[in-house]
Structures are given as structure tokens and as C-alpha cells.
Amino acid sequence: MYVAVMDNIFLLVLVTLLSVVQNVFFALKVEKECTGQHSKNHSEAFERLSCANRNCMDTYPTFLAVLWCAGICLSQAPAAFAGIIYLVVRQKYFVGYLGQTCQSTPGFLFGKRILFFLSLMCVVGIINHLMLTYGGSDYKEYIQTITKIVSTLLLLP
């Protein structure tokens, strides 16, 4: 039974651990800037890093919730794929925020699209479960096939 459970959540666990490592990276960047020299440029750089880190942390609980809900309720592989893409986009957002603020906008917008996709996966998975429980109809295989195809479309700009 343990192996069956791990098979169903292993990719989600990996994405979650990668996101934790990314959070540590962000925190270390903020700490490094905080302990650096005290000058006007330092203060501006620290403010940008701090703001980028805070913005990333504000969306982090939502990301984890929809990642796990989508992976468990519908399909692990597309949810994990979307999670990896989200982490790459979040990194782009963070690094973009270090330059001009407008450089972070593409990462922000792309991240919103991925969170929407994961949220949609959650809703579809829950609706399918309710249809199976109360209506006797199970469309999970069809929905998983469509989800796998649609998840590749996340790569389009």
C-alpha cells in the first residue's frame, strides 16, 4: 500500500522539495544583500530583493494547495509539470525584479496562468469525483488525456 501511495504523489513531493530549495535560495539572496555594505544602492537593491521575496512568498501557499489538489484529484504528471514550469517562472520573476520592475511582469503574468491551470485541474478533478460518487459516471481517463495535452500548451508564451 505504501508503494501505491508513493507512486501517486512522488512527483508532487519532488516539486514541493524543489520549491523549498528555491525558497531557501531566495532567503539567502535577501540575507546576503542585508549583510552587505550600507549605501544608497544597497538600500534600493535590498528593497527590490525583499519585495520580490515577499511577493513570491505571498503566492506560495496558493501554489502548494493547487499543486497538491490538482495532482491528487486529477493527475500527478501534468500537475508536477505545471509545478516545475511555475518554479522556473518564479525564478524568472525574482531575477527580473532585481533589474527594472517591468522585467518581472512577464514572469508574473505567466505564473498567474499556471496557477489558473492548476486551479482548473482541481475543479475538474473534484467535479469528476462528485460525478462518479453521485452519478456513476467516471470521465477521469478522458480528462487526464486532455490535461496531459493541454499542459504542454503552458510552454507557449
Image (cartoon, rainbow, N blue to C red):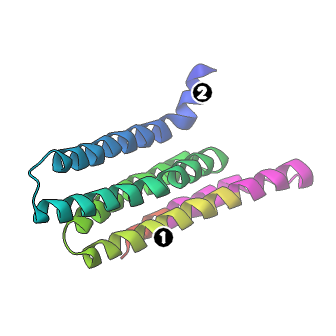
Q: Position of residue 149 (x, y in %)?
A: 51, 64
Q: Is residue 127 magenta?
A: yes
Residue at 48% across, 57% down: 59
User: Is there any visible trace of residue 143 in the rendered image?
Assistant: yes
Q: Nearer the viewer, mark 1 or mark 2?
A: 1
Residue 96, numbered circle:
none
Residue at 23% across, 62% down: 95
Q: Amino acid at mark 1?
A: Arg
Residue at 87% across, 48% down: 133
Secondary structure of the residue carrying tag 2 is: helix
Residue 50 versus residue 1: which sits nearer the camera?
50
**As drawn, is 99 to the left or to the right of 57?**
left
Q: Amino acid at mark 2?
A: Ala
- Main secondary structure along the magenta-highlighted residues: helix
Mark 1 — residue?
113
Occupied quadrant, residue 3: top right
**In the picture shown, does residue 99 fall above or below 29?**
below
Q: Is residue 44 magenta?
A: no
Q: Which residues are magenta?
A: 125-150
